Amino acid sequence: MLTLVHVQVLSAGLFCIGLYGVLARRNVVLVLLAIELMLNAVNVNLVGIAAFVDHGKYLGQIIAIFVITVAAAEVGLALAIILRLYRNKGTANVDQLDLMKW
Amino acid sequence: MTSLVLFYLAGALALGGAVGVVGTRNVVHAALFLLVSLMGVAGIFLLVFAEFLALVQVLLYGGAIIIVVLFALMLTRLQDFGGSMENRQWPIAALAALGLFFVIAFALARSRGSEETERLGPGVQELGRSLFTQWAIPFEVASVLLLVALIGAIVIARAGGRE
């Protein structure tokens, strides 16, 4: 029988894999893809809770729709910024993009 | 029982794709692995009665976001960095990610446990009605956000400007 804990553990796994990707990868695009993974982990959690706990309210699904909207906007903007960075700096390596580092 | 088997299948797809995203050296392969992972997540959405979200997931991620990422990769000719694809702090990152996972898993194991209630999902009709009545203002704000992101992306990525 599928329970909420199954869904939550899966969500935690996805989130942690995404976290590792954000912290460890050197390529900007790969960091962006890992952020997408984390957003999806959050969506899985929200939808799971909407199905198992929040009967008849499906609040989680509504919020997941907004999360997907924000994720789409974020990918568009982030890729534009990456294109710009690449054109101006000639690199996509996070370690070399330290202009705003104190 | 069937739902559990299907859940494990979709979960293996999602987690396997995610490991591929953070594990592969090739950036294009990483984008395709992300697509695999997101389709696994769409399967999970179907299993927890979120048909509309599963559809949106396939349409938006499969049809739009991955394509945009691939286009960006094509335009930037991202070079393969010599040596490692990970930075120096990857052991700490792995430790942090694993630690967080175990903390969450421990908390879930200690929690009261979800009572076995029947699962319900809204139909697409109810979801749409709720979105356009109770959630109408956030919906409009989201549309403005998309418009701003669209204009911003055009302005930022446009050729020319200061070099």
Image (spheres, rainbow, N blue to C red):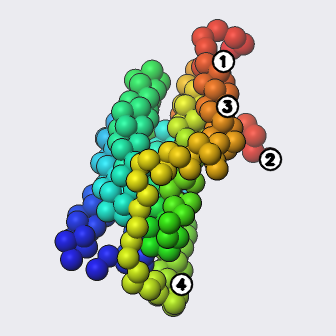
Residue under the image location 49 percent in, 50 percent down: B127
Chain letter of disc 4 in the image: B
Q: CA distance from mark 3 to mark 1?
A: 16 Å
Residue A26 appears left or right of B139: left
Residue A84 position (above or below residue A43): above
Chain letter of disc 2 in the image: A
The image shows residue B146 at horizontal and vertical percentages of 61, 31
Chain letter of disc 3 in the image: B
The image shows residue B41 at horizontal and vertical percentages of 36, 55
Q: Which residue is mark 3?
A: B144
Q: CA distance from mark 2 to mark 1?
A: 28 Å
Foreground mark, 4 or 2, reads: 4
Q: CA distance from mark 4 to mark 2?
A: 37 Å
Q: CA distance from mark 1 to mark 4?
A: 45 Å
The image shows residue A57 at horizontal and vertical percentages of 54, 64
Q: Is residue A96 visible?
A: no
